[in-house]
Amino acid sequence: MEIVKEIQIPTNSLPKMIKIKDLIYFEGPLLSHFESVYKENFLFYWVDTNDTFNRWIIFRTSNELIDDYLEKRKSLYNLISDENNGNLYKVDIDSNLDYNNLSIIAFEDIPDSYLPEKNSFYTFKIINSNAELKSISEKENVGILQAYYNESSKIGKGSIDLEILGSSLNDLSNINKGIRKAFLNREKNLFNKSKPKNVNSKDSKFDVQAVLQASSFNYFGNTARSFGALFKPASQQSNFPNLVSIEDRYIEFFMHFFEYSTSIEKFTEFIKDIDKNVIDNYKKLLTIINKSKIQFNLNYENSTSNFSISKKISYAEAGTILNNINNLDYDNSHDLHLTGRFTALHLKTGHYQFETFSEDQKTVEISSGYLDSDRKEMAWTIKWDKLYDIVISRREEKKTGQKKAKIEDRIVSFIELDGTLSIPE
Amino acid sequence: MNKVYKYQADFDAIAESCTCPGSEYFSFKEKEAFRFVFEDPNHPNNFVPPLKISPKRFLTKEAIEKCESLGLSLYGQKSGAINKFEELIVNFKNFKKVIGTHIAMGIVDENDGHITKEDEFTHFDMYEFAGSDLSRKFVIVDEL
């Protein structure tokens, strides 16, 4: 190994650190992000080896610079040569992970063979840092969804501004409610299309419960780094090795909502069958991310099926998506099937309000609009204490620049059911 | 026939903390493979996985790292190996000291071990069976 100009210091001089993630890994770490107990960011950069040691250069950096590096705006050379780094350290680490020959080294004294090329931009596939998530998934034997914000002035290690937490969880929950409805419809359609015609209808019944449970999440804890909430699907389905589960498929669908929102074309196509109220909640979430200048991350890991997916939204990207949403232009119509009761009705105009409560989805949905002309003639038969199956034709229209979508509901069918409905107040 | 892995004792030692090797095996009969090696055919690091190379290049003692490090890195295509080398050498000028100076080619078969799926660089890991000796199957075909 090279002899370098250095100032030796005691091997316990570095602050206690924990590894956040490996940024470059080949048969072992080569560039790893660590964080000190004082919340300073350090990079461990491998530079050399001999029979006894691996040599590393350790230098301070910032979350912003690491993001710039991962987004290819800065090279590894830019990071190591940044004049704000302060001291750079050199350490020789042996097989037992003991630190030897710790020293301070000036950037200008680093040998050329210990420096990356100036064009050392990040070309690697971002390494999923989900070792912790994987082990939780393995322990729980289910896929685990983690939602977290990168650390900032408002987000600490395991702590978070209450307003950000409350609003984010509420928005995320409402987004999930809307997405799962669309997923349920998609699964139903797929099931009906693939159902063999000669099979007994009892044996080939669509399992609504399985889909609903797979797309419902229970909060069950935090991860240790910057505030990270952990969720697991409510379902009790068994996981099978290397077999993508229904929970995995739902998460993939859920993630596509976030992924496609960066492209107006893809997003317009994806949201055709999705309740547009979801977009209002998404806008709230994006506004928090953008205004608080924080990065939002979703990671999912299922160690049994070997399925993982992740999405991050930086504050800059949140601004772009908000702009996309403002420029959305769509005019979609689709039918909604609801079961519930009428809570208001104007016999002359046909204006109604209808409320449904779903035990399965634990949600109350309210629709208001007009009866179509045929239904208006029969409006006098409607009873307040009766249950109805109704079909609503919902038209959702939004023009570029409009802040909110215009939603028009029109009842095209109502059928009185036996029995009365008890709706929780 | 149940085969015993070459590093079975290491797998057993970490069995409580992780399932190792993972279950993502790709079935194969025989396959052309490439590996980074040193020119000296007797170099001790030529055909051993990272965990068996001294000094070990780790920063934490996580068991999962040990599991991954018991797989022998191979490539399905020479171009994949070269692309990976070029990607790494821009960032780590001394990396030849770790992986070697040449590329060797050989034919591996199902009796040598389990393999994982190839990634975008055609890289795959082989978890060798006891008795497997890839050094007898590989010859140097290029210099890095």
Image: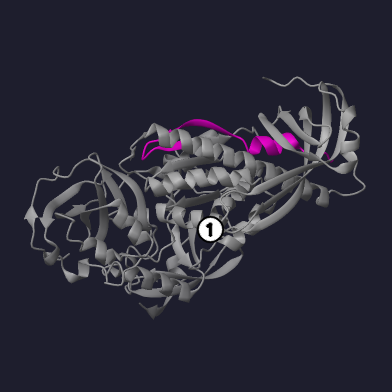
**A273 displayed left or right of A26:** right
Image quadrant for the N terminus of chain A? bottom left
Depicted A263 relative to depicted B37: above or below:
above
- Residue A138 visible to an observer of this rendering: no
Which image quarter: residue A362? top right
Its colouring scheme is: one colour
Q: Amino acid at mark 1?
A: Asn
Which image quarter: residue A363? top right
Residue B25 image point, x, y percent: 57, 55
The residue depicted at 25 percent of the width and 61 percent of the height is A79
**A70 displayed left or right of A337:** left
Q: Is residue A219 magenta?
A: yes
The residue depicted at 50 percent of the width and 57 percent of the height is A323
Query: For the magenta stretch, what is the residue range?
Result: A203-229
Residue B132 image point, x, y percent: 48, 60
Subunit under mark 1: A
Q: Is residue A401 magenta?
A: no
The residue depicted at 42 percent of the width and 67 percent of the height is B135
Which of these two is toward me, A312 or A163? A163
Q: Residue lying furthest front in this view?
A: A348
Which image quarter: residue A10? top left
Q: Residues within 10 Å of mark 1 (few under 14, many from 20)?
A: many
Q: Which residue is mark 1?
A: A324
The residue depicted at 75 percent of the width and 43 percent of the height is A409
**A92 displayed left or right of A257:** left
Residue B91 image point, x, y percent: 30, 67
Depicted A42 relative to depicted A140: above or below:
below
**A191 displayed left or right of B144:** right
Describe the element under mark 1 as helix, strand or loop.
helix
Which of these two is toward me, B117 or A412? A412
Image quadrant for the C terminus of chain A? top right
Q: Residue lying furthest right in this view?
A: A198
